[in-house]
Amino acid sequence: MIDSTLPNFRAMSPAQRLGHIARTAGLNDYEHALLAAPGALPLETADGMIENVVGTFELPMAIAGYFQINGRDVLVPMAVEEPSIVAAASYMAKISRAAGGFSTSSTGPLMRAQVQVVGVSDPYGARFAILKNRDELIAMANARDKVLIGLGGGCRDIEVHVFPDTPRGAMVVAHLIVDVRDAMGANTVNTMAETVATRIEHITGGKVRLRILSNLADLRLARAQVRYSATTLQTKEYAGEDVIAGVVDAYLFAAIDPYRAATHNKGIMNGIDPVIVATGNDWRAVEAGAHAYASRGGRYTSLTTWEVANNGDLVGTIEMPMPVGLVGGATKTHPLARLALKIMDVNSAQELGEIAVAVGLAQNMGALRALSTEGIQRGHMALHARNIALAAGATGADIDWVVKKMVAARNVSVDYGMGLLQGPRDA
């Protein structure tokens, strides 16, 4: 049984932290060494993943602790360069445990493949023709992926969308609705779309142009909810009720104003993207789907909701597309992606998606709590101080000394750090 609580984790050295995670997650000696050594992605493997490879680029990989999701403790690997993200998510997960942590749910792993048809004079007639031949087209699509069918997936349905008046005339777009199981599904749905294209041309009398997946995976949703009591949110400077009121006001700002919503949702993705990157998934696809989904009502708005329950608790929810996989792509070829999935102990793509949105919800709460109380810079800059100290030229024991001085002076800047290093070393 994994224990996601990480007491005194920040005070440990990286080697000590890794040792603790290795023991907790049951890593073997090879896996322990893989995480401990730089360059875990061999150049030969990298060369097979993308084109024109000249090297590899590393990001810090951390573990967010204290997450309890559907009653199960989860250690969450996060690959990200920005300070404060892991700390904020872990802290909000820690205090959420008092109310049972995060509860999650998700829809099935359904993806859309779009087949664009142009050059039709009777678009609604073309729509009828495609739907009349629905069963034949589904059978054609499924004939191309026997493995997926054997796993219980496959093309489930066909939708047809009509755009009767575009600058290029009428356009008809067929959507193949495909259950991709534990894959992200891009290659599968693209192949199916290409398979049925010629037949759709014959059925409609039109010309097929694009045959490609949609990253607006609005049939593949993941949801999470969390609850915080006023007592849990109380600090030395702020009453818990005031924190709750501030968070709700901050959320409503994002709900009504797209300028705020863009930054609000970026904060959510601060939590989600590092999980997607660490597990070798396509973070650009997740980002694209998230922001399109936030605009589905015709206006860009918040991906989360924050409201006050009858008993005064703060309740947060999130729902968004989560097209992630456990098989295929970098999830299988990148050694650390496979290791991240083992540390998380996930058994399905749906479970991975649910964990990711729970982290996004925690990250959102951390940002809203800071913004509505002491402001974002106080905590963020304190955590950012180590980066600034390094940029100022601090090394060894001087790093902690410069950090302490900058934080105490509330002047976290390269210029101030350089001045400290050039001056006397007092206590």
Image (cartoon, rainbow, N blue to C red):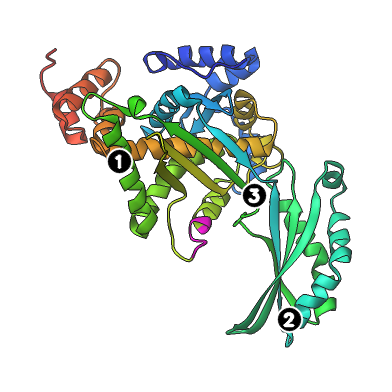
- Of labels 2 and 3, earlier in sequence is 2
Figure quadrant of residue 47? top right
Residue occupied by mark 1:
245
Question: Split into 4 quadrants, where in the image is the N terminus?
Answer: top right
Between marks 3 and 1, how big is the CA–CA gap?
32 Å
Image point 14% across, 12% down: which residue? 427
Is 2 positioned to the left or the right of 87 in the image? right
Does residue 125 appear in this view? yes
Residue occupied by mark 3:
220
- Of labels 2 and 1, earlier in sequence is 2
Relative image position of residue 422 (x, y in whole percent)? 14, 24
Outermost residue toward the bottom in this view = 121
15 versus 81 height, above or below: above
Between marks 2 and 3, how big is the CA–CA gap?
28 Å
Figure quadrant of residue 279? top right
Secondary structure beneath dot 2 equals: helix
Residue occupied by mark 2:
124
